[in-house]
């Protein structure tokens, strides 16, 4: 040790620091590329393994043997597997996911059309989950064994164990059919079909942008039930995780030190403990958001929500393999993206993981 | 004149499945603006004694005492909010390991400034000025830089100085130092102790130094309490360690290697049930 005031910080010169940053960037890109390639390999080989003949799906089962053979060569299916994979990767890289048999449109266009619906629902669900789940989890940890703790336990247990389609149907029955507080399935009433034109596909945002208040009210009343439902399941998970992260932080010595210097309990809980618990919590929230973005098939089915989950399920039921695999690639890419985002957030939240 | 701290028959108990477990039993002492050492092995109740005085024991702890007064204030009767106002402002505690006792995600300066703001309404600039002054007072050479560092970026000795700065910035009258050097390198231990020593002398604070190192404590304090299994077994004048009579104290004094003669094997501590009343 150099002396009593030695600081454990390597004195990096400027060019070395810049090179370090470049290296980190290269590493990041290589990691991203590898992960994406792995994802494509998965979807590609799943596409080969499933018992759907891609040629038959295109030409139909009454085509002559000649037509079948020609199509097979046109689709490149006679070439070696590894070459086919190369072609596939090149095509996906250009945003070419093939045609959907069901809608006879490019799969990518289809996904752009249905994804905003899922994005909207998942975002509201996660917002509800975070806004209620985090404070509930914190309070449960602070008053361990108290009323809120019991409540969080029950809510969590129900959230884990109740099937969403059942709860969704019951909620529809009560709030839509019996009480009439909210609108039923779908994203917007048919009445608005001709007056309301979407802009981004996120209807609630579009209505705001266009200043169409009656459409906005209608959209919100359609959104209320499914997003509350997704929000509930996300809340159940997030509150449990918040509680356990907070219990861990509250038992640390720096909390005792914060009390020793006379800080009010409020500050200790929300500024010290939660700020530390936020580090792992970010990953949990990001992954739960990614899970919802995959399109919660059951929720979208119950509420006739024209989102990604419903799209892929329909495609699967009709052996529309391009759509299924294209959707899978998109979902995978979203998942990887959110994972990276949570890694970046993690780094900004925890100074110990930052490179200086 | 009322003494700074009066402790009479202090007990700390914890409920468990097999009934109450006693961590501290009938500890009594009085402290003026002087230095008192509390010595004992781990589990002897010395840290629990310190935390009970600070009011930092966990909520399930049962604290009883015939008398527990700080500057005439009855700590057992005081409301939780009044005790909080005492903490940091009039009594403070330095803990063992800065690696765990500093908030890892907050800058060092920020943690000192926060201690200031908890006690008084002062401007941010003034708080920063005082915090920098305090960092200088604990012999940190480059306070400006350390102010902006995170706890993981400084060495153990530096972290412990920052901890001391954070705890003393509001000029408390009583400092409880709970093993303040045990987690540090031997080479920095004495420096950190000197920082505490200087500040305690300058400001005329009362000091309770908790440690397992009897000789170290004796060289620093006026009086030493020797604790064993939650009880005080002997109270000694630091200058008169040779007058120690209790076999446990003698054991503590004896179980140290010596330079001038081989000691192999080192004697181990003897523990007897009959030492407990």
Image (cartoon, coloured by chain):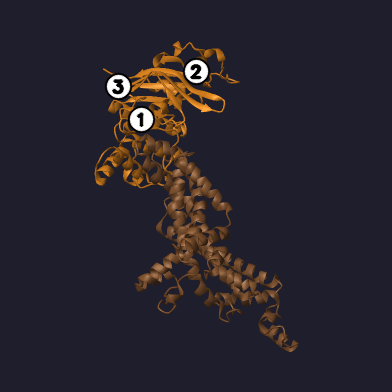
In the rendering, at what x and y percent does residue B169 appear?
A: 30, 36
Residue at the image position 45 percent from the left and 57 percent from the top: A128
Give the color of chain B as drawn: orange
Is B135 rendered above or below residue A122?
Answer: above
Asked if the residues shown at circle 3 and circle 2 are in contact, with their CB atoms under 8 angstroms apart, the answer is no
Work out which residue is located at the far front of the displayed protein and give it.
Answer: A178
Chain letter belonging to callout 2? B
- Which residue corresponds to mark 3? B72
Which residue is disc 1 drawn over?
B196
Separation of residues labelled 3 and 1 (CA atoms): 25 Å
Give the crowd class for mark 1: few <14, some 14-19, many >=20 residues within 10 Å.
Answer: many
Give the number of the disc on residue B231.
none
Label 3 Cα crowd, 10 Å radius (few <14 / some 14-19 / many 20+):
few
At 43% from the left edge and 76% from the top edge, which residue is drawn? A191
Q: Spot the brown chain and give its letter.
A: A
Quadrant in which residue B188 is drawn: top left
Q: Is residue A356 above or below residue A70?
A: above
Q: Is residue A68 left or right of residue A16?
A: right
Cα gap from disc 1 to disc 2, whole angstroms: 24 Å
């Amino acid at each position: 040790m150099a002396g009593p005031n030695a600081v454990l910080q390597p004195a990096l010169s400027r060019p070395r620091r810049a090179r370090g940053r470049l290296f980190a960037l290269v590493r990041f890109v290589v990691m991203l590329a590898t992960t994406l390639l792995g994802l494509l390999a998965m979807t590609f080989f799943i596409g080969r393994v499933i018992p759907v003949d891609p040629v038959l799906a295109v030409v139909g089962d009454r085509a002559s043997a000649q037509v079948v053979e020609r199509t097979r060569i046109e689709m490149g299916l006679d070439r070696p597997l590894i070459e086919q994979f190369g072609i596939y990767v090149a095509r996906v890289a250009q945003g070419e996911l093939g045609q959907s048999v069901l809608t006879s449109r490019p799969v990518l266009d289809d996904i752009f059309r249905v994804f905003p619906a899922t994005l909207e629902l998942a975002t509201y669900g996660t917002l509800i989950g975070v806004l209620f789940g985090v404070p509930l989890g914190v309070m449960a940890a602070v008053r361990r064994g108290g009323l809120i703790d019991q409540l969080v336990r029950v809510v969590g247990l129900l959230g884990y164990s109740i099937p969403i389609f059942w709860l969704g149907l019951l909620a529809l029955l009560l709030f839509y059919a019996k009480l009439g507080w909210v609108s039923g399935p779908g994203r917007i009433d048919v009445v608005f079909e001709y007056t309301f034109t979407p802009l981004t596909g996120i209807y609630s945002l579009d209505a705001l942008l266009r200043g169409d208040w009656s459409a906005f009210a209608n959209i919100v009343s359609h959104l209320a039930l499914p997003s509350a439902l997704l929000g509930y399941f996300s809340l159940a998970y997030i509150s449990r995780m918040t509680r356990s992260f907070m219990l861990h932080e509250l038992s640390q010595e720096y909390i005792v030190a914060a009390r020793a210097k006379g800080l009010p309990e409020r500050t200790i809980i929300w500024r010290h403990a939660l700020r530390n618990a936020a580090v792992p919590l970010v990953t949990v929230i990001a992954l739960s958001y990614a899970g919802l973005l995959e399109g919660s098939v059951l929720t979208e089915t119950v509420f006739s929500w024209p989102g990604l989950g419903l799209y892929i399920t329909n495609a699967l039921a009709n052996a529309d393999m391009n759509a299924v695999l294209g959707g899978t690639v998109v979902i995978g890419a979203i998942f990887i993206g959110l994972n990276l985002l949570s890694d970046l957030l993690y780094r900004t939240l925890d100074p110990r993981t930052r490179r200086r | 004149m009322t003494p700074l701290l009066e402790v009479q028959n202090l007990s700390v108990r914890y409920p468990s499945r097999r009934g109450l477990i006693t961590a501290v039993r009938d500890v009594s002492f009085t402290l003026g603006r002087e230095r008192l050492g509390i010595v004992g092995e781990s589990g002897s109740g010395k840290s629990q004694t310190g935390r009970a005085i600070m009011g930092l024991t966990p909520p399930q702890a049962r604290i009883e005492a015939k008398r527990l007064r700080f500057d005439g204030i009855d700590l057992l009767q005081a409301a939780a909010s009044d005790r909080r106002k005492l903490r940091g402002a009039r009594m403070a505690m330095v803990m063992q390991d800065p690696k765990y006792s500093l908030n890892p995600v907050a800058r060092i300066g920020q943690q000192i400034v926060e201690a200031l703001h908890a006690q008084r309404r002062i401007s941010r600039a003034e708080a920063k000025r005082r915090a920098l002054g305090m960092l200088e007072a604990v012999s940190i050479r480059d306070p400006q830089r350390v102010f902006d560092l995170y706890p993981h970026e400084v060495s153990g000795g530096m972290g412990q100085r920052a901890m001391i700065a954070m705890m003393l910035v509001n000029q408390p009258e009583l400092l409880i130092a709970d093993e303040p050097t045990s987690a540090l390198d031997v080479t920095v231990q004495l420096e950190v102790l000197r920082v505490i020593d200087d500040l305690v002398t300058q400001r005329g604070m009362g000091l309770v130094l908790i440690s397992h190192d009897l000789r170290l404590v004796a060289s620093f304090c006026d009086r030493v309490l020797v604790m064993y299994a939650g009880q005080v077994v002997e109270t000694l004048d630091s200058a008169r360690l040779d007058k120690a009579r209790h076999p446990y104290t003698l054991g503590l004094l004896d179980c140290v290697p010596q330079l001038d003669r081989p000691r192999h094997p080192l004697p181990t501590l003897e523990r007897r049930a009959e030492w407990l009343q």
